[in-house]
Amino acid sequence: MRLPCEVVRDLLPLYTENMLSPESRRLTDEHLAECGKCRALSEQMGVKAPDVQFRVDTAQEFARYEKKKNRKLAVIVCAVCMAVVIPIVLFYTAVVGASAAFLYLSVACAEVEVDTDPAHYSMYMGKDAKKEYRIKWEMDESIFPKEITADMEVVDYEMAYYDPWDAQYLSYLTVTYSSSDYADELDRLGSCGVMPYVGYYGVTGFADSSDPIAMYSDEYNGFVYAIHTPDKENTITYVELIFCNYCFDIDYEPLIPSEYLPLGFDAKPNNPYRDQKMKGMK
């Protein structure tokens, strides 16, 4: 039996705390040995994933990783609860049921963090970003500017972060450029290209039938893109909508102006696109 990525990512907090049954941990180890994305996430959470040759000979070897220190009591309570229900959920429910049960128990353990200060931009973007913002499910953020410089007029900015167990990111940056800098930025974004995106999460295009200037899309993890800002000359808006399990676990609509979102975009829990993808996995 090979566990799906969604289930493994739900199990990683318990994997970190050595609270999985021996069989569940064995299946998780096998998946991490083969899946680079899940392995990178486990390392981000402070767990060194096994390499391909990793052997497990005794039940005691499953307990060799030390528990992480300074866990909040709320997180421990959530983890203990999940240790009881996970074996039953894994083998007697569908994958959708497992994800829903896990999210229901973990949602109270995290809060949405929102920052609207452009001076903090470098904390969330690029190679020097804080650890929890550096990987972002391996989504390509090169569409966003490397930094905010003095000659960039920041019109609008927000970074929202949520991590009940699976990290999720929503950011937008609106910049007005001088005429020459605007032309240069269009050239840079043109080199980034536009990946296919129509159909992902119900997206049909953008307002006024305009195409994005640049687009990085992933059918599982979402979008990073740049668009012409409506009704503003020499102005570009950069957006990233990054999540997992085929949905945002937060109410994202109040966090971003609707004109910055693609038309038809629906990443709410149990959205039709997610339902379709999850049915295909059964």
Image (cartoon, rainbow, N blue to C red):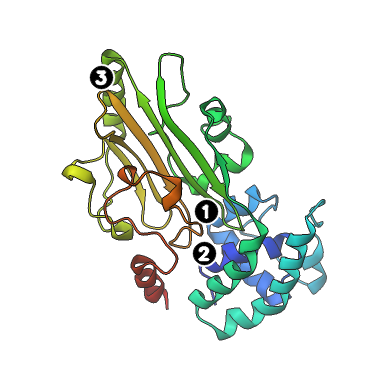
- Amino acid at dot 3: Ala
Residue 81 spot, x, y in % from top left = 72, 73
Task: Give the mark, 3 or 1, whose residue is nearer the N terminus.
Answer: 1
- Amino acid at dot 1: Lys
Q: Residues within 10 Å of mark 3 (few under 14, many from 20)?
A: few
Res 5 label: 2
Q: Which residue is mark 3?
A: 183
Q: Which residue is mark 1?
A: 37
Q: Are marks 1 and 2 in contact (CB under 8 Å)?
A: yes
Image quadrant holding the N terminus, namely bottom right
| Outermost residue, bottom side | 92
* Closer to us: 29 or 257: 257
Residue 148 spot, x, y in % from top left = 47, 22
Name the residue located 70 percent from the left edge and 65 percent from the top edge: 14
The residues tagged by marks 3 and 1 sit, at their Cα atoms, a distance apart of: 36 Å
Horizontally, residue 133 falls left or right of residue 199, namely right
Q: Is residue 54 visible?
A: no
Q: With respect to residue 138, does 144 lie above or below? A: above
Name the residue located 34 percent from the left edge and 66 percent from the top edge: 273
* Closer to us: 118 or 241: 118
Horizontally, residue 173 falls left or right of residue 75, namely left
